[in-house]
Structures are given as C-alpha cells and as structure tokens.
Image: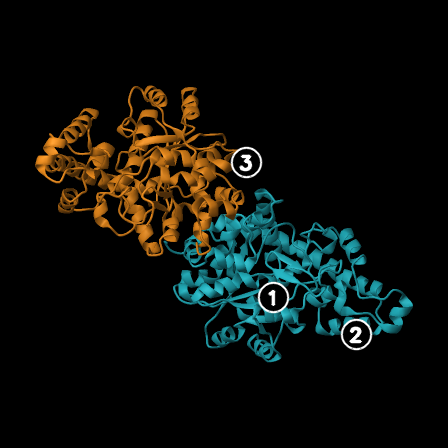
Chain colours: A orange, B cyan
Amino acid sequence: MPDPDTFVVTPYEVRGKIDYARLREQFGTQELTRELLARLHQAAGGELHPLLSRGIYYSHRDLGPLLDGYLAGHPFFLYSGRGPSGPLHTSHLAQFDLCRWFQRRFGVPMYIQITDDEKFWARSGLTREETAHWGLENLYDILALGFDPKRTHVFFDSRSIAALYPLAIRIARKIPYSTVKAVFGFEPSTNIGLVFYTALQSVPCFWPSWAEGHSVPCLIPCGIDQDPHFRVTRDIAEGLGYPKPALLHSQMVPGLLGDAAMSTTGNVADNALFLNDPPATVDRKIRNAFTGGRATVEEQRRLGATPEICSVWALWRTRFAESDAKFAEVTAGCRSGALLCGECKGQLLERVHRFYDEHAQAREKAKGWAESTIVTEAPKPI
Amino acid sequence: MPDPDTFVVTPYEVRGKIDYARLREQFGTQELTRELLARLHQAAGGELHPLLSRGIYYSHRDLGPLLDGYLAGHPFFLYSGRGPSGPLHTSHLAQFDLCRWFQRRFGVPMYIQITDDEKFWARSGLTREETAHWGLENLYDILALGFDPKRTHVFFDSRSIAALYPLAIRIARKIPYSTVKAVFGFEPSTNIGLVFYTALQSVPCFWPSWAEGHSVPCLIPCGIDQDPHFRVTRDIAEGLGYPKPALLHSQMVPGLLGDAAMSTTGNVADNALFLNDPPATVDRKIRNAFTGGRATVEEQRRLGATPEICSVWALWRTRFAESDAKFAEVTAGCRSGALLCGECKGQLLERVHRFYDEHAQAREKAKGWAESTIVTEAPKPI
C-alpha cells in the first residue's frame, strides 16, 4: 500500500496528496510572504491579482531583487509556456492570467514557449501532427486572454528553432546528463530528445538579454511542478553571463474528480474543463464535480461543507470569483451551510458559460494576429 | 601496460594499432570484395577511384542493393560531413575525394553536413566562434575539391537547423539514451548536446526522401570510426519509413608521426599536413615524417624498406600518386631499396606543393558560391 502522505511532483508527474509547504522546503524555494505581496501590490500601482491575494501563488525564487530592479528602472520580461498535448483546460489559464496581469500593470514584454517538440518526446501516444495542431490551438486560447499583440512574442519550438538553437547550443554544453537524470528522474529508456529538451526550455530565460546585448531580468510564473527545469537554468545562468530567472510558483489546481491536479494525462477527460468543451459538457462536468459537501442536505445545513477539498471552490478561487467579496461570500456560505452545492454550482456555471462565450469571441480575433507573434529568426549570428 | 593488440575505434576516439579486418568483424560490416568493386567499376563507366582500387575503402554496408537500384534507374545521393574543430588536413580529404568522384561518375547530388554544434559539444576547449569560423573555412576547402555547385547542398548545423530540426524531432523519439550510451560510450558527465547529437547526424540520411516525398537511397563514404553513428540511423530508418543508408568505410590515414590515424586532437600539429600550412611547414613536416626506412642507407639499399608502416607511402597511396602506375613504381622502389626515403619525400613534395597551389585557387572560387549551397529551410511544414 502506498503511504497516503507520499506525493510526487516533477515536471513529468504529479501524484498523491501534495503538502505544499513541505514541497516548498523540498525544492528549496522561498515563501511568498505578506510583506513581499505588499511590495508587489505597491509596485503594481495598488492592485494584486486574485491568484496572488488568494494564495494560489505561494512560493518564489528571487522575486524581491526583481522588484528592486524594476523600481530602480530596470524592466523585466515574463516567460511562460505550454506543452501542447491537447486542448487547454481552465487550470492551464492560471499562469497566463497572472502573466497578462503583470504585462498590463508593469508594461513588460511577454514570451510564450509552445513546446510541440517536447510533448512529442514526452508522450509516445501523440503524433507530431497532433502536437503541432494543439500548439496552434493552444496559442490562440492563450493570446485571447488579453495579451498585448505588440509586446507578446512566441517561441513555437518546431517553427522557432532557428531563433532558439544558437543559444541552446551554448546552454547544452553546460548541462551534463547526470544533472537531467537526477532532476527529472530520467531512465535509460528516455529518448534523447527529452534528455536534450531542458536546454531549449532554458533559452527564453536568456533570449532577450542575448537580443538586447545587456542583462534583462526574467520572471517565470509557473506551477511548482515546473521548478526543476528552471533550477537547472538558474545553475548555469551566471556561467553564460546572464541573470538567473526569478520564479513565482503556484499550487496545482485540483481536478474535478478530486485529484490533486487538474490533469487529464490518464485520459480522464471529466477531471477538467476543456476550453473546447460544448456548454452541455461543461454543465455535466460541473454538476458531477467532486465537492466538500455532506452526505445529506440536512447535514450540510447543520454542519456546513469543506471548501478546501472542493474542486468547485477551487474554480471560484482560481478564476471565476469576479471579486474578493464574491469569493468571501461563497467561501463563508459553503462553510456555514447556507450555500448548498447545487446552488453554488449553478452560480459558478453562469460565470463559466459567460467566460466561454467571451473567450470564443476573443479567440477569433487572436487568430488574426497570432502568426505575427511567432519569432523565427535569431537576433544575431552564432 | 596496455596490450599492444588493444585498439579502440569510436566516433570520439581512435587509439592503438588498428586491426582493420578484426574491426570490420567487430562492427559487423561487409567486406568490399573484388567482385563488388568490379560491379562498381562497371557502373561507374569503367573507372575506379584510387581510394577504392588501392584498398583504402575496404568495408561497406548494403553497397550491393544501392548499385542494383542505381542500375534499375533509382539514383542515390551522397552524404558526408565534417566536424569543424580546426583547419582540414589531407587525411580529411579522402571521403570528399571519393564523394566528388561518385558525384561526377554517377551524376548524383551531394549533401555535406558541417557540425559546428557537435564539435562545440565534443571539445570543451573550443569556443562557438571557433567552430563557426572553422565550419566556413572547412566548407571552402571541401567545395574546392571540385563539387558541382548545382548538385551540392550543405547543412551547416547552426545555420541550417530550421531545415534539419523537424526531422530530428521524429528521429530523436526513436533513440533511447541507453542506445547512445552503449554505442558511443557516453559517461554521466557527457553534456546533453552530445547525447542529442546523433539525431541531427541522422537527418541528412533521410532528408532528400522527406523533401521529395519518396524513398531516395543514401550512400555515406566515411572513416570506419563513424560507422556507429550510422548503425543507430540504420536501426531506426524503417520505423520512420525511410531506406537504411548504405555505407562505404575507409581505413584511417596514418599520421606523419607514425600514429594509426592522422589526428591532431592531442595538439600534435606535426602529425598532419594542414591545408593552411605554409610551404616551408609542409616541407619540414614531410622531411621529418615517420617512414618504413632502415637505420642506414646501406642497409636500406640491401634490404629495402617497409611501405605498409610508412606515413609517406600512405600519402602516395591515399591521394598523391597520380596514377596506379606511379603508385606501383613508388611501392616497388621502396620495397626493393632502389628508392630511398629522401628521394621519395622529394617526389611527394613536388606533388603536394602542386596540389596546395591549385587548391588555393579553387578555394578562392568556391568562396564565391559556398553560401548558395547552405540549406536554411525545411522542404515542408512539420
């Protein structure tokens, strides 16, 4: 029997009931303290994104020095990415929602990496045609969240390789096989594409510094499961003459079936809300979603429910509560027993459907300018 | 004490006194028989290149089926490459001399890969600027040997990556780390660039088939030390729907100091004739070169010398004897004692200097069209 306290979090596997405080200690990252959040609030002109104020982003590396630099007149850039294995689901939006907020509040460039090569290497069941197809589909969804067409740049790996490879060559020489084996838990059967891949995932961290000829700090909002990739990057940064990227780590968004992460790797489509799910499917998935409710209405009215274990509450928390007041209302109603699960789901569904409608329109517009964001050339020779 | 019979031949190391027959057995390649050479002679319109007739190329994989196909109306293409770690020396010319001969006699395309990424990964002492610089310098030397500008195509890795990468992605998924570890003897400290590299070295074998949309057979003349790379390629070819490349393997050209191979990896510059050596240096290196001569003139006149162990005889044999008659005359004179080493070296030097002069002129012309041979785009998406 596996120990129920055992959890595994790597870029290629998330399993078990995650103790996020312990994970932060294991990974050696810093706590995102109230004090640092207050500084971020101030630097952003008196606003914090709900993903920050509600504690979904809870860990970081070097956010303090990045803010110091910004306030001293040294702008940073944002970097995030997506491995296109299929349609996006709502939990994938967290990192991009936060990036869009940073881009708007700080007026900084955003770099997005679409890793259609890496997903082909990581998932033997996917064809290249599929990862290329989903790469473009996912990109439309991401850009539709409201990124600035003039300040958003995309590395679509298979199409941007000429822009990425010169730097990847330098990076790869700094990374021995033993490092990726230890960090990612690779086996002898792991293919040599995946072994190489972390070099390419590091490139965007340094690319603007390379292009501009001076240090440009990088901020990476990502799920904490992606931290190992960038630990490798941080270790080699100084040897290449580039700044170490700063990181902001989120907890994983729980799946609709009650799993620790909204993953559908095991082909459990009902665990997540896909952005291409039709309205009736969204309804069904939310109506069937795992909650923190009680066995009977009577019991729930009397004892209240448990939001912390509820996948529906996680959706309110990470994306769909339009204000902190609404989020507090839902949370209090849940805990007190005043708000029953059916009513709560109904209220959430209104918001989810509204988002899907608005998103579909924004997505059509984004298709018109998505190609123009794809970087295809190196900024300089070698 | 190392066993004097021990020899090591891998793409990254050549060491010891090589037993070529045993090496062929170890590698599991086929003997280049008189019968097969006769068929090649006939297919080439009644000619054999000296590198074939003098036995420097001595081993192959699937040359027979390639010739069968050619005679049935299915043309092949040639593929060879160069890792640009410094200036070319004369032993590097063997594979390209043979390719040029094939290109002329069979009217087929030639693909040349310049691996400026791989050499940067393989040699920690080289900078990227150096491998890029030598890549271009080496390319001029290769093209100057007489390749047809219209039928010669170059993959200069760092600059051709957009053309190579889509196929490399597919290839890399087929190759587990355990394979490259076993074939190349990689260590945990080997960098992830070198681990990945064999995927890129395989690409040209399949590229024309990919571009043309039907099977185009590939012939690779190379030193037998490069066979392991292409054993990996051959193993994955059918799974990708491409033909296995055929190979023609040469022995290594002995070094001027008497080593098994004309390598200068150990910084022993006097072991090789570099194409950028000035005439006085060429003179000195040949005058000091290791021979199969006797201790005294008297003894040599009486007993004769031993061409098989002589680095000067190897130069006659591999490149500088302009006819089989001249080669036979030198060999017989050496063996009988009639031709002393000083006189032999003088005759060779005349030819070496003439080649250097003619080559310098051809090289200047090649500079004018070298850039036009570099492939920078993939033939089709994905």
Question: Is disc 2 in the same subunit as disc 1?
Answer: yes
**Could you tell me which secondary element the residue under label 3 belongs to?**
helix
How packed mark 2 is, by other alpha carbons closer than 10 Å (few <14, some 14-19, many 20 or more), is some
Q: How many marks?
A: 3
Q: Earlier in the sequence, mark 2 or mark 1?
A: 1
Mark 2 near mark 1, Cβ–Cβ under 8 Å? Answer: no
Mark 2–mark 1 distance (CA, rounded to whole Å) = 25 Å
Chain to which mark 3 belongs: A
Provide the residue designation for mark 3. Answer: A239
> Looking at the image, is A185 positioned above or below residue A65?
below
Residue type at the position of mark 2: Ala
At x 42%, y 26%, the residue is A66
Chain to which mark 2 belongs: B
**Could you tell me which secondary element the residue under label 1 belongs to?**
helix
Position of residue A354 measured from the top left corner of the image (x, y, whole percent): 15, 36
Residue type at the position of mark 1: Leu
Mark 2 near mark 3, Cβ–Cβ under 8 Å? Answer: no
Q: Residue B13: which quarter of the image?
A: bottom right
For discs 2 and 3, the disc positioned in front in the rendered view: 3
Residue type at the position of mark 3: Gly
Provide the residue designation for mark 2. Answer: B332
Position of the N terminus of chain B by quadrant:
bottom right
* Label at residue B98: 1
Mark 1–mark 3 distance (CA, rounded to whole Å) = 43 Å
Q: Report the side of B63 relative to A328 (left or right).
A: right
Mark 2–mark 3 distance (CA, rounded to whole Å) = 59 Å
Is residue B294 visible in the rendered image? The answer is: yes
Q: Residue furthest left?
A: A298
At x 38%, y 40%, the residue is A226
